[in-house]
Amino acid sequence: MPSVPGSSAQSPEPVRRAAVVTHGQTATIAPALERLERVAQACGVELVLSPEEQEKHGRPGAGAAIEGVDLAVVLGGDGTMLRALQRFLGTPVPVIGVNFGSVGFLTSIEADELETGLERAFAGEVQRMELATLEADVRGVLRTAVNDIVAHSTSLGRMVELDWVVGGEGLGRLRCDGVICATPSGSTGYNLSNGGPVMVWGLDAMAVTFIAAHSLHARPLVVPRSRDVSIVNRTPDVGVSVLADGHLIAELEPDEQVTVRLGQERSLLGTLPEATFFTRYRETFAS
């Protein structure tokens, strides 16, 4: 049965082919990759490593195409999860993570439970959660983000003046270091560290949070689908950098704008049944 937006449905079939995505610290993650390979062999699962992963881990051969896999397994933290969710965006492949990072909120399996957790995942116990994405429009060029779109001053230590418009209605001008537009899955990252709201997985909305606003009245705002958010650079002598999931996509000159909206594509997060949003929230942030 296919997933619907924000739903969680169990994968009905055992996994036969799984892609592997690992974080950048090769020496640290190599033992975990060997553990994953042993589990996959025992479960009859073919592991597929992209050419980049093959080169990273010194595996022979040119790597394999990762299309046609049933599951993507991440060995890493939230940054690696983000990279994998972006890679499999628009496909039916869920991404499940084993936490080898510092936070790992998006992961489902702890490092010391790799074997038991992945045995269950390979047996078909994966829940699929569709998560909203964002689309940034700068000068007619569109970019999709899984986590967030950030617009910030290009000059360290220099504030910028930003107009912000939601659904065609102007909400004023603020002096600040920048602004974050975050998805629910991205709300626990840069957005949270700047005082933005945590949004439950499955919400079809984005959070708008200002960075170091020079105002007592700047408050985060949660915006639903169908309400575009436009951020206009009104600073006469400072540019504004626009980043999608941490990657620079544009520089806004004075009076230029970026428009952010909820995207049509959705990322597909895989979890074990007990690793719900509220369980992860309690274990990660409330303990």
Image: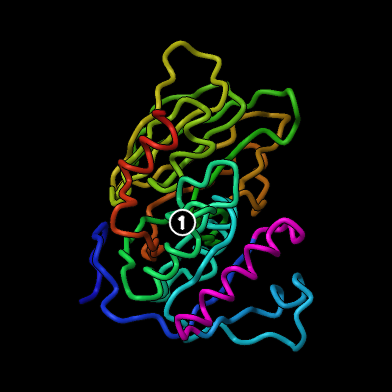
Residue 187 falls within the magenta-colored stretch: no
Secondary structure state at the residue bearing disc 1: strand
Q: Quadrant of residue 168?
A: top left
From this viewpoint, is residue 186 visible? yes
Relative to the observer, which residue lies in front, 255 or 179? 179
Residue 41 falls within the magenta-colored stretch: yes
Type of the residue with mark 1: Glu
Residue drawn at point x = 37 percent, y = 53 percent: 262
Query: For the stretch drawn in magenta, what is the main secondary structure?
Result: helix
Read off the residue under disc 1.
135
Q: Position of residue 170 (x, y in %)?
A: 38, 32
Above or below, 250 against 35 in this view is: above
Furthest toward the top, the residue is 216
What quarter of the picture does the N terminus occupy? bottom left
Above or below, 30 against 61 in this view is: above
Residue drawn at point x = 69 percent, y = 73 percent: 53
Q: Quadrant of residue 265?
A: bottom left
Part of the protein shown in magenta: 23-45
Relative to the observer, which residue lies in front, 77 or 214? 77
Residue drawn at point x = 36 percent, y = 31 percent: 221
What quarter of the picture does the C terminus occupy? top left
Q: Position of residue 160 (x, y in %)?
A: 63, 27
